[in-house]
Image: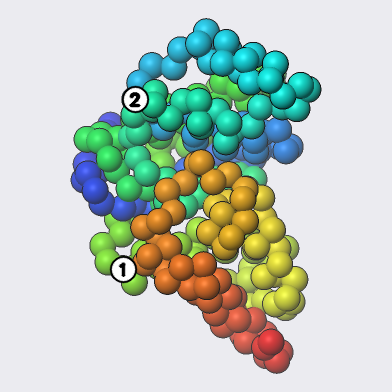
Amino acid sequence: MPRGPRDFTNGEIYHITQRGIEDKKLFLDENDYFRGIFSLYEFNNSNPIVIRERRIEIARIKASRGTSPVNLEEMAKVEQKRRNLFVEILAFCLMPNHFHLLLKQLKTGGISEFMRKTGGYATYFNQKYNRKGRLFQNHFWSTYVDDEEQLKTEFVYVHTNPVSMIEPGWKQKGIKNLTKTIEFVEKYKWSSYADYIGGKNFPSLTSRNFMLDIMGGVKGCHDFVNDWLKHKYKLTGEHPL
């Protein structure tokens, strides 16, 4: 049976993990990942979504810029006044069969309602792949972040999760190629890390000022992540950078 709403406290931070049922993949191609990103943005809003108004606005933007597609950042500017956020998304990472979110709750019941609404991604997925039934596990997992050191650790954990895609078992066995791993993490498109280290990936999805202060700015984000990866690299017995 699905769990009922959990007690999350406004203003507090939680690490949320949601997995595919039986660890099945949630994202099979690039378009699925883009849809996942859009869903995180779209469903973080307690106000009703007025499809007709959005279509009119999209048409207006398209008319003003020719054939170029309308992106998430343009829609964020359009809908800024219409949005009433459930949570602040401090960090995120989408993986093939699960995703991680670092969330600060803004409204009572906000995290539970936000996660319930993000389940709407399953409708898109089922229609696209002609499948039926649940896509996600019955419940998402949550960890309360109770101090600054844990918050830094969770930040690193979320953003280094993709390492397993090129270094299976790296947390136990260590990393064999540090340079390749650091580059992979920095260029991994489906996380917020690029936005934290000076890139521009999906900047409208996350609220980063708080974490940048905690981590010590862009350099601090770099240092915490790279130091952790270097530590894992040393486990292999090879020479660090």
The mark that comes first in sequence, 2 or 1, is 2
- Say whether residue 53 is visible: yes
- Image quarter in which the N terminus is found: top left
The residue shown at (52%, 8%) is 52
Q: Determine which of the numbered discs, if any, sits on residue 148 in the image.
A: 1
Type of residue at label 2? Ser
Looking at the picture, does residue 15 appear above or below residue 58? Answer: below
In depth, the one of 100 and 104 nearer the eye is 104
Looking at the picture, does residue 11 appear above or below residue 51? Answer: below
Q: Residue furthest front?
A: 64
In depth, the one of 174 and 30 nearer the eye is 30
Residue 163 is left or right of residue 1, and the answer is: right
The residue shown at (58%, 51%) is 191
Type of residue at label 1? Glu
The residue shown at (56%, 82%) is 231
Q: Which x, y percent locates residue 142?
A: 36, 49
The Cα–Cα distance between marks 2 and 1, rounded to whole angstroms, is 29 Å
The residue shown at (27%, 40%) is 106
Residue 39 is left or right of residue 111, and the answer is: right
Q: Residue furthest top?
A: 52
Q: According to the image, label 2 marks what residue?
A: 46
